[in-house]
Amino acid sequence: TQRALLESGTLGPKGHVQVIVPHLTESYASQRDPPENDVPFCTLKSFPSKLEHTIEWARDFGFGGLFVNKPEMWNSLLDEPELMARLARADAGGLDAKKVRVVAKMCAARPTTFEQCVHFARCRFDAYFTNKALQLLHNFPPDHTTDDAGTLFWAPPKRPPTPLKFDWDDDAHRAFVRNLAYLWADTWRIEHDTSDAYAAEHMRRMVADTVVPPFVPKKKTIITDESVKKDEAAAAAGEGGDGGD
């Protein structure tokens, strides 16, 4: 209690800083943190209605899934003793089945060139901003009702999504693909040029040459229950989610 302290923290898009100076300010114990009101998993995943929801989705699902959770799974699995011998066994030697599935998919799709990173980023654009919206509208059409009284599913605060069509000349679209390609290349330690000149001349061609798979509706259940937690939904899905499914 006799030492100065600078305390700070974050929660979703929020942050705070508190300065404690002995005999000048209140002590650290004078205040209690307010109860945390977590945003329901289904709201972040599929039904954002506020700007902070989209920020949290981008951090936790987009960035966290691709550049934190999956690489951590990769490194954790590689650190397992006698890995190859255990993988050859029928029971995978007691290894985490989810981790093995995720890493196997990463191995199959691992890029070796920067152009492959660009193709990956371009396809991710459609996965996040086109296909996801189309899948939601497939499961829940604009006129979808929730009861016999005709209550619309897409009623405030839920908002029906608008599928985006990629346009290189759109600053936000271009920035997304460029930066995702750079980050994906950094993840796999692939050298690349980040100059605007390179992007204008070469990345634009790479993006144009990308074969983007057409959208095909999936037979899947989209969680709408606000009581379902993120870890419960992830366990049910059985994968390390990155928000693109």
Image (tube, rainbow, N blue to C red):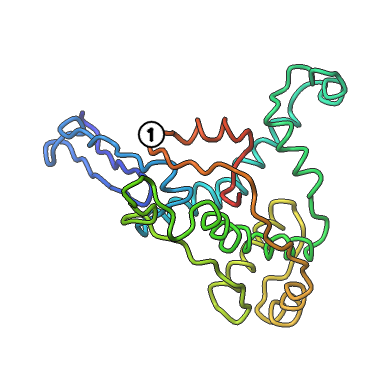
Horizontal side, residue 230 vs residue 80: left or right: left
Which residue is tagged 1? 227
Residue that appears at 42% across and 52% down: 47
Q: Measured along the vertical axis of the image, is residue 196 above or below residue 120?
A: below
Towards the viewer: 173 or 12:
173
Within-10-Å neighbours for mark 1: few <14, some 14–19, many 20+: few
Residue that appears at 63% across and 67% down: 177
Q: Amino acid at mark 1?
A: Ser
Towards the viewer: 232 or 178:
232
Residue that appears at 72% across and 78% down: 204
Residue that appears at 56% across and 62% down: 129
Q: Position of residue 242 (x, y in %)?
A: 59, 47
The residue at the far front in this view is 148
Numbered marks: total: 1
Q: Classify mark 1: helix, strand or loop.
A: loop
Horizontal side, residue 175 vs residue 96: left or right: left
Q: Measured along the vertical axis of the image, is residue 148 above or below residue 72?
A: below
Q: Measured along the vertical axis of the image, is residue 113 above or below residue 26?
A: below
Q: Quadrant of residue 124?
A: bottom right
Q: Position of residue 99 (x, y in %)?
A: 69, 31
Q: Position of residue 192 (x, y in %)?
A: 74, 66
Horizontal side, residue 180 vs residue 93: left or right: left
Quarter in which the N terminus is drawn: top left
Q: Position of residue 199 (x, y in %)?
A: 69, 77
Towards the viewer: 142 or 161:
142
Q: Quadrant of residue 93?
A: top right
